[in-house]
Amino acid sequence: MADLRMPAINHTVLSGHLGRECNVHESGVAHNGLCHSRRIKGEDHATWWNLVAFGTTAEILAEQPKGAPVVVEGRLEIRDTQDKEGKPREEVQIVCQYIHPLAWRDDAAEPTPEPAPIPEDDIPF
């Protein structure tokens, strides 16, 4: 039998709102939180994700204000940390590869301009 290998895929796409002003370290690493909300049986449920970004992605994350709606693409990573009492724990974070800022609701409320009409000569059929 041929040696079948499972592809190593670790890709996450989440949408939500940024939970705080971005914390950027001197090294250029940016940290923030993402609140992903969903409604289940009429009740709102929120999950908070820790975000970390590097380079240009960190710059884009740092430009976004608290509460900004974004779509984040990246990979899941588990980091070993310690709590306040020194006990070891694991923390799941998303290492951001792309950050897509979304329009605020007020911006989206602006009317979309009508598309220009297509002349009859330009229609191929």
Image (cartoon, rainbow, N blue to C red):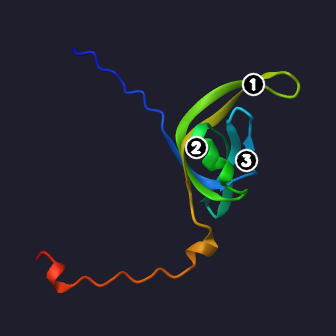
- Circle number at residue 57: 2
Which of discs 3 and 1 lies nearer the camera? The answer is 3
Residue 47 visible in rendering: no
> Tag 1: residue type?
Thr
The vertical placement of 116 against 77, above or below, is below
Most extreme residue toward the right is: 85
Which dot marks residue 81? 1
Classed neighbour count for the residue bearing mark 2: other residues with Cα under 10 Å, few (<14), some (14–19), many (≥20): some
As measured in the structure, the alpha-carbon distance from the residue carrying label 3 to the one carrying label 2 is 12 Å
Badge 3 density bin: few <14, some 14–19, many ≥20, Cα 10 Å: many
State which tag comes first along the sequence, 3 or 2: 3
- Where's residue 38, x and y in %? 61, 57
Q: Residue at x 44, y 82 (%)?
A: 113
Q: Nearer the viewer, residue 49 or 109?
A: 109
State whether residue 122 is above or below residue 26. below
Callout 1 crowding tier (Cα within 10 Å): few <14, some 14–19, many ≥20? few
86 with respect to 71 (left or right): right
User: Percent position (x, y) of residue 41?
Assistant: 61, 61
Q: Nearer the viewer, mark 2 or mark 1?
A: 2
- Amino acid type shown at disc 2: Thr
Residue placed under numbered mark 3 in the picture:
22
Q: Earlier in the sequence, mark 3 or mark 1?
A: 3
Indicate the quadrant where residue 7 lies: top left
